[in-house]
Image (cartoon, helix red, strand yellow):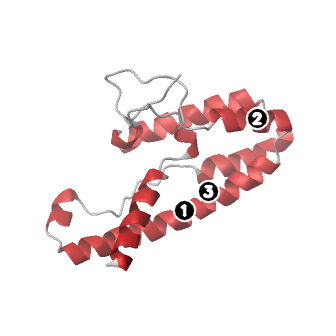
Amino acid sequence: MNVLNKLLIAGLLAGSIATPVLAADTAQPAPQEKSYHHMDPAQREAWIAKRQQELHDKLKLRSNQETAWQRFATAWKPNLHEDFPSRDAIAKMSAPERMDLELKHMKQHEIMMGQRLEALKTFYAQLTPDQKKTFDAETMPRHHHDGAEGHEK
């Protein structure tokens, strides 16, 4: 039972950090706007591209920082889980099969997060102290106190 509890906790933790750093938005979403997690893949990709461009502009990057920026931005492209089965297919699986699938995706997510972390560290090392301060402020998640999707001002 202890192993199952650890797996469930790991799953919850992985899900809680799954939102990319660049998903942090300083503006309050409009009530009709879907949250990041509920957007269709095209909307999510456009939303991330917009946030990346805003961050790029606020950082006022020098030309010698652009290569590191491009590597960083590419690493943060959304992972759309294209190989993830449909809800109907999952409903036909047994509980152990669903748990195996979840564990497989957690491991894939861990690998992706490691790659993103390396790209982040490389890019961050290229920034000036003022740019680091801006980057830290702009990428800080801002969640409502009630736990709802969205961001505080």
The picture places residue 24, in percent across and down from the top left corner, at: 54, 36
Residue type, numbered disc 1 = Met
Label 3 to label 2, Cα distance in Å? 20 Å
Label 2 to label 1, Cα distance in Å? 25 Å
The picture places residue 36, in percent across and down from the top left corner, at: 41, 38
Which residue, given by chain and number where applicable, does mark 2 sit on?
Answer: 133
At mark 1, the secondary structure is helix
- Quarter-wise, where is residue 13 in the image? bottom left
Which residue, given by chain and number where applicable, does mark 3 sit on?
Answer: 116
Residue type, numbered disc 3 = Arg
> Disc 3 or disc 2, which is closer to the eye?
2
Question: What residue is at 49 percent from the left and 52 percent from the top?
Answer: 17
- Quarter-wise, where is residue 146 in the image? top left
Label 3 to label 1, Cα distance in Å? 6 Å
Q: Earlier in the sequence, mark 3 or mark 2?
A: 3
The picture places residue 7, in percent across and down from the top left corner, at: 39, 71
Question: What residue is at 67 percent from the left and 33 percent from the top?
Answer: 137
Question: What residue is at 47 percent from the left and 68 percent from the top?
Answer: 108
Question: What residue is at 29 percent from the left and 72 percent from the top?
Answer: 99
Which residue, given by chain and number where applicable, does mark 1 sit on?
Answer: 112
**Mark 3 surroundings: few (<14), some (14-19) or many (≥20) residues within 10 A:** many
At mark 3, the secondary structure is helix
Residue type, numbered disc 2 = Lys
The image quadrant where one finds the N terminus is: bottom left
At mark 2, the secondary structure is helix
**Mark 2 surroundings: few (<14), some (14-19) or many (≥20) residues within 10 A:** few
Q: Are marks 3 and 1 in contact (CB under 8 Å)?
A: yes
